[in-house]
């Protein structure tokens, strides 16, 4: 059974964010590629005043190094339920299913780095 749902992601624990639709069939590598593309093109993911910055097309593209889900506390026992979980290929389907059941309350936190290792 396949299902799709919207998720919010934030970049490097900042106000940079966007929304996308994922499904339980989405792999972690597909999600990383999708987020990298969104981060480079979305106005919601741009740095403040970046529109005045000189564009450098030769600059290294930012890549996703890690994705965590920040679980909403609402409706969960915070004494036993984790605050966050690192998303891996092995747990991605289960994480996405839990997020789908959370009705958009859970947020993906994404670590982006430039090719040279700079955040």
Image (cartoon, grey):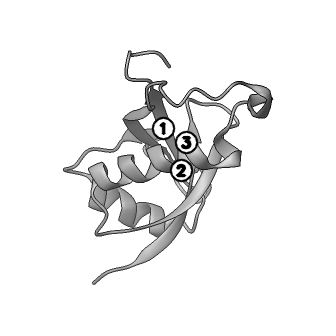
Q: Is residue 70 above or below residue 54?
A: below
Measured as percent of width and height from the top left, residue 25 is found at 28, 69
Task: Give SS at disc 1.
Answer: strand
Residue behind mark 2: 38
Measured as percent of width and height from the top left, residue 70 is found at 51, 43
Residue behind mark 1: 110
The alpha-carbon separation of the residues under discs 3 and 2 comes to 5 Å
Measured as percent of width and height from the top left, residue 6 is found at 54, 67
Nearer to us of marks 1 and 2 is: 2
Residue behind mark 3: 40
The alpha-carbon separation of the residues under discs 1 and 3 comes to 13 Å
Q: Quadrant of the N terminus?
A: bottom left
The alpha-carbon separation of the residues under discs 1 and 2 comes to 12 Å
Nearer to us of marks 1 and 3 is: 3
Residue plotted at (49% across, 71% down): 5
Q: Residues within 10 Å of mark 1 (few under 14, many from 20)?
A: many
């Amino acid at each position: 059974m396949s299902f799709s749902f919207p998720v919010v992601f934030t970049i490097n624990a900042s106000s940079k964010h966007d929304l996308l639709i994922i499904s339980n069939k989405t792999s972690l590598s597909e999600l990383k590629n999708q987020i990298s593309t969104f981060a480079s093109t979305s106005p919601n993911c741009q740095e403040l005043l970046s529109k005045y910055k000189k564009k450098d097309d030769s600059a290294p593209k930012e890549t996703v190094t890690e994705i965590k889900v920040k679980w909403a506390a609402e409706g969960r026992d915070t004494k036993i339920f984790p605050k966050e979980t690192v998303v891996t290929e092995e747990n991605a389907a289960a994480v996405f299913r839990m997020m789908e059941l959370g009705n958009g309350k859970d947020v993906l936190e994404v670590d982006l780095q430039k090719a040279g290792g700079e955040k």
